[in-house]
Amino acid sequence: MSELIVSGGPVFDGAELRDADAVGVRDGVIVAVGSRSDVRGALPHAEEVDAAGGLISPSFADAHVHLGLVALEGLDCSLDDAGSEQGCLDRVRAHAAALDDPAAWVRGGGWRAEWFAGGTPSRAALDAVVPDRPVLLLDSDRHGGWANSRAFALAGIDRTTADPPDGRIVRDADGAPQGTLREGAVDLVGRIAPQPAAAELAPGIRRAADHLLSLGITGWQEAALASFGSIPDFTDAYHAALAAGLRGRPTGAVWVPRDLTVDGVADFVSAVRERAQRGEAAGFATRTAKLMLDGIVESKTAALRDGYADGSTGLRYFDDDLVRAVIAQLNAAHIPVHVHAIGDAAVTQALDAFAAAGPAPSGVRNHIAHLQVVNPADVPRFAATGTTVNAQALWACRSDVMRTVTEPLLGPERSSWQFPFGSLWRSGAALAMGSDWPVSAPDPWQAIAVAVTRREAGQPDAEPLGADEALPLAVALAAYSRGSHTLIGDGTAGRLVVGAAADIAVADRDPFRTDVTEIAQTTTAWTVVAGEVVAGSAAGAAGTAASARACPACE
Ligand SMILES: [Zn+2]
């Protein structure tokens, strides 16, 4: 029998602050919430974690994250924070020079459009540093690629190659590939690059999971399980990581392939069911499907009803008949759908399909992630269709890219429709949150700070992105903890109430008692999964229960 008490701070139960300063745990389940003396009386021999005045809350869950990509990039050439075109080229040159195999690919990711003239990095620049071996580098959003001439040649792409239906090859004046690839065009090169094995990726997935645990995140959803070109299906790597001791509650969403037809939906649904059964045995729940409907605003691939200034309307990966068929048949098989929708037309397409499918079976929670541009007419339809909002709140501020790229593309009216979390909450929609790491940082407190202020951290005087769309702190915290666990988990974690699974996060302060501008400085001090301390400030990120203060009577 293992017992633990977390005490010495205000207790947020997943909905509201309680008149309590302690939580008692036995064998992974919460058995008491109340005053420290009462909880100690119930558990006289328990070890104790001292919250030191910090907020005691349910752990967080990240409802949209890509640990597989984090692991992949650990093997590859990371361009995160390279800062400029020259910074990227220096790293690529150094990475290539360190490869032993003369035929090995240089792969990597993390470049940002704003580092390059016109936002389109060129193959000529890459050729100058790596002329002899193929190079393929994904952008920071993982929606674009940058390749050199050797990679284009190996892939057989030249001026005669047509754009794929789901992407674009950026071209020079003469039609030859310029170097930048958008969306599905990345796969034209990626499909010939070798995929790393599950055993190579598993240690990186475990390290990434440990990072989530250190941030107070004990559950998460791997947002796309599928093999895309050079990116492998991460399912086997998860199974290997779990077998090697990965901690936490991972779940995953199985990708709906872009070439799916209405006639093929029934077979796809059976395949998702079979995978779910295999995953359950390994501890990796994958009973969810991921339906990516459009791209992103910054590369004009998000689906906008009224289009962009140049007359284009973005990409729509599926027609309405397919979206309706796949959602209706997945839900009928008790499989929830996790939609990627950024543009207003994609959001409307998803909501139309959820409405057409009718109420989902009990316990099947559909959700739409990202929700960047939402037509106000669609806001009440989330609650009406029982669709959960899967918010990446860190994006809901007037960052440099927002002001210089996104707002000019959208114009003032649609810019004001972005990330309408306050309106969605007031309309009665269920809220969950996630980070999209490694696209953006995974610390929940950073995202909660933006959700509450609609400003970037450390910019208290910046103009907010739609001040009316700010969420109260309790609502944002509930969304990232209880809301996300409810959406993606098995229903046991996400609340600090008797009978719930003991997944607990302890903050380094009480953000309810600090100025809102300080919420972004909040960090997680302790994390508990199923009653076990897995991360704690007293022991560093890899802390264990040994660092918790032991019961004086037992010493
Ligand atoms: Zn994502």
Image: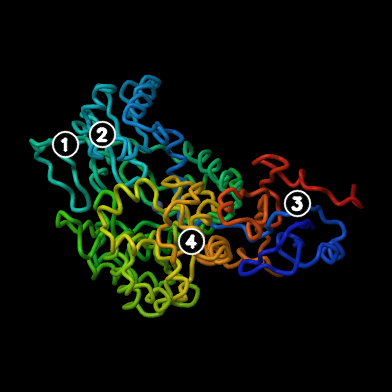
Quadrant the N terminus occupies: bottom right
The answer to whether any part of residue 225 appears in the image is no
Closer to the chain start, of discs 3 and 1, is 3
| Residue sticking out furthest to the right | 553
Q: Where does label 2 land, which residue?
A: 147
The CA distance from mark 1 to mark 2 is: 9 Å
**Which sits in the foreground, 169 or 440?**
440
Q: Which mark is residue 536?
A: none
Closer to the chain start, of discs 2 and 4, is 2
The percent position of residue 64, horizontal first and vertical second, equals 45, 55
Q: Which mark is residue 277?
A: 4
The disc labelled 2 sits on which kind of residue? Ala
Tags 1 and 4 touching, CB below 8 Å? no
Q: Residues within 10 Å of mark 4 (few under 14, many from 20)?
A: some
Q: Residues within 10 Å of mark 3 (few under 14, many from 20)?
A: some
Tags 1 and 2 touching, CB below 8 Å? yes
Marks 3, 1: nearer the viewer: 3
Q: How crowded is mark 2: few (under 14 residues within 10 Å), some or many (20 or more)?
A: many
Q: Residue at 44% of width from left, 49% of height from top?
A: 66
Does residue 284 appear left or right of residue 34 in this picture?
left
